[in-house]
Amino acid sequence: MHSGQRSMSPVPRSSLIIDCIRTAARSASIDGEALLREVEAANDVVRKPGPGKRDERRWVDECVKSQAQIYVNYTGRKIGFTNCEAETRFERFVRLVIMSDDQKHSRNLLKTAIRRFNQKQSQDRNSGIGLAAE
């Protein structure tokens, strides 16, 4: 590297997660450290996937479910699904939470998990159960 050139270091994933929630939040004040503790605690509960596709699907479904209440609590927004190419705020949040260097998950796998979760939430809301925006 020549003198005067700076190396471009990647932004820490934790900062991206906090920024994602701040962007989506209706409230300006977000405790980033508390958010990250909740995200990590939710991730610790979800069993890691095995080598099979069925295990990966189960894992992504459980990650979506475990992060949904955190997203709702911090942003005040409902979890939505869209068929368009644009990434939803919730999709971006979950993708940031689950991405890692050793595991690559397809966007379609995540979108499908969110669709299944959203359908389940719609059924639960109709029966009086579901996530509440606080």
Image: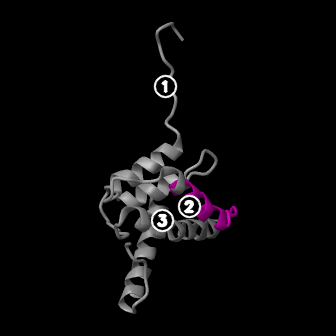
- Residue corresponding to mark 1: 8
Q: Is residue 2 above or below residue 106?
A: above
Q: For the residue marked with disc 1, what is the amino acid?
A: Met
Q: Position of residue 5 (x, y in %)?
A: 47, 13
Q: How packed is label 1: few (under 14 Cα within 10 Å), some, or many (20 or more)?
A: few
Which element is circle 3 on? helix
* Mark in front: 3 vs 1: 3
Which element is circle 1 on? loop
Residue 26 placement, left or right of 97:
left
Q: Is residue 22 above or below residue 56?
A: above
Residue found farthest to the top: 3
Say the numbered circle drawn on residue 70: 3
Q: Quick check: is 44 in the magenta stretch?
A: yes
Q: Is residue 15 above or below residue 128?
A: above
Compare residues 123 and 25 and report the one nearer the observer.
25
Predominant SS of the magenta segment: helix
Q: For the residue marked with disc 2, what is the amino acid?
A: Glu
Q: Which residues are magenta?
A: 35-51
Query: Is tag 2's residue or tag 1's residue first in the polypeptide sequence?
Result: 1
Between the C-alphas of marks 3 and 2, the distance is 7 Å
Say the numbered circle drawn on residue 38: 2
- Coloured how? one colour
Q: Where on the picture, by quarter, is residue 54?
A: bottom right
User: Can residue 105 be seen at all in this image of the molecule?
Assistant: no
Query: Is tag 3's residue or tag 1's residue first in the polypeptide sequence?
Result: 1
Q: Quadrant of the C terminus?
A: bottom left
Q: Label 2 near label 3: C-beta < 8 Å?
A: yes
Q: Quadrant of the N terminus?
A: top right
